[in-house]
Amino acid sequence: MKSKIEAYIIDKVREKRKEKNFSQVVLSQKLGLSESFVSHVESENRRAKYNVNHLNEIAIILECSPKDFWPDTPIAD
């Protein structure tokens, strides 16, 4: 199960990914990972998560700041 902060970040990445019209497969490929990686991260039933390095690479790919994925205030679980 993903924590609230993990779910928040995943939702923000999904939102930015869709704004750029990137599929899960395309983002996975651009990250140099398996084609199902982003799908696994975005799935509630999988344990896959983004790490800090992933978030930095995703920000480069999506042409945004890594800060765009984080909330302005802490999220309590």
Image (spheres, rainbow, N blue to C red):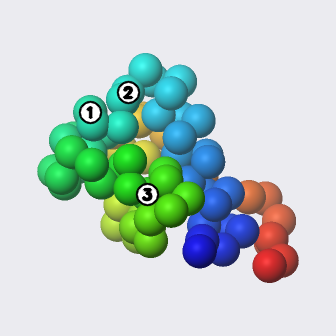
Name the spot of residue 63 as percent of width and height, x first. 42, 35
Q: Do the numbered discs 1 and 3 sit on residues whose CB atoms are within 8 Å?
A: no
Q: Quadrant of residue 10?
A: bottom right
Marks 2 and 3: CB-CB under 8 Å?
A: no
* Residue 75 x, y percent position in the rendering: 80, 71
* Residue 13 drawn above or below residue 9: above
Q: Secondary structure at mark 1?
A: helix
Q: Which residue is mark 2?
A: 22
26 on left or right of 11: left
User: Which three-letter amino acid code belongs to the residue tagged 1?
Assistant: Val
Dot 2 and dot 1 residues touching (CB under 8 Å): yes
Residue lying at the far front in this picture: please name it.
Answer: 45
- Residue that mark 1 sits on: 26
Sequence-wise, the earlier of marks 2 and 3 is 2
Tell me the mark number nearer the camera, choosing from 2 and 3: 3
Q: Which mark identifies residue 4?
A: none
Q: CA distance from mark 2 to mark 3?
A: 15 Å
Query: Eyeballing the image, is 36 above or below 26?
Result: below
Amino acid type, residue under disc 2 in the picture: Phe
* Amino acid type indicated by mark 3: Val
Q: Is residue 6 left or right of residue 31?
A: right
Is 15 or 2 nearer to us in this picture? 2
Image quarter in which the C terminus is found? bottom right
Task: Look at mark 3 in the image and give the residue it sits on.
Answer: 41
Q: Earlier in the sequence, mark 1 or mark 3?
A: 1
Q: Residue at x 72, y 68 (%)?
A: 4
- Viewer-nearest of discs 1 and 3: 3
Which residue is drawn at the image coordinates 64% and 60% (left, top)? 7
Expressed as whole percent of the image width and height from the top left, the position of residue 68 reads 61, 48
Distance Cα–Cα, label 1 vs label 3: 14 Å
Q: Secondary structure at mark 2?
A: loop
Based on the displayed image, in which of its 4 quarters is residue 74 positioned? bottom right
